[in-house]
Amino acid sequence: MSGSKVNEMSRAQVAAAVRALPKDRHLVWDGEDEVDRPLSREEMKAGMQAAARRRGRPAGSATKEQVAIRIDHEVLAAFRASGPGWQTRMNDALKEWLETHRAG
């Protein structure tokens, strides 16, 4: 594996090296700032499980269908320039047009 570093120190050697560090360089929580508190094993496990559930594409809507459509460059550029969510705004514009042009 290129770029990976191997640590050949034993757990005891690592602990001794940490103890040898000056107190201001220790990686041990001092109990003062809750933000610096390390996660418990349960909190770490819960976070990893939550991250695993979020992986992949979001669940799709059962009300939409994916199609291939050709749109004029100017129209597409204008919607894309409006920022994230442009496809939803384009869908809303088509719905609005549909409501004003329904036969009946």
Image (cartoon, helix red, strand yellow):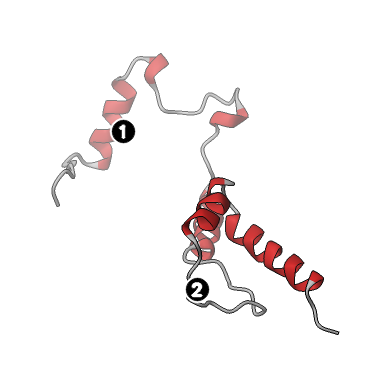
Q: Quadrant of residue 50?
A: bottom right
Q: Residue at x 22, y 41 (%)?
A: 10
Q: What residue type is disc 2 on?
A: Ile
Q: Residue at x 61, y 30 (%)?
A: 34
Residue 87 can be seen in this image: yes
Give me the disc on residue 47. Answer: none
Disc 1 or 2, which lies upstream in sequence?
A: 1
Expressed as whole percent of the image width and height from the top left, the position of residue 62 reads: 65, 80
From the viewer's perspective, is residue 23 above or below residue 81? above
Horizontally, is 37 left or right of 15 in the view? right
Question: Do the residues under discs 1 and 2 have CB atoms within 8 angstroms?
Answer: no
What separation in Å lies between label 1 and label 2 (alpha carbons)? 62 Å
From the viewer's perspective, is residue 8 above or below residue 74? above
Q: Quadrant of residue 7?
A: top left
Q: Which residue is mark 1?
A: 15
From the viewer's perspective, is residue 45 above or below residue 38? below
Residue 42 can be seen in this image: no
Q: What residue type is disc 1 on?
A: Ala
Give me the disc on residue 69. Answer: 2
Horizontally, is 34 left or right of 55 in the view? right
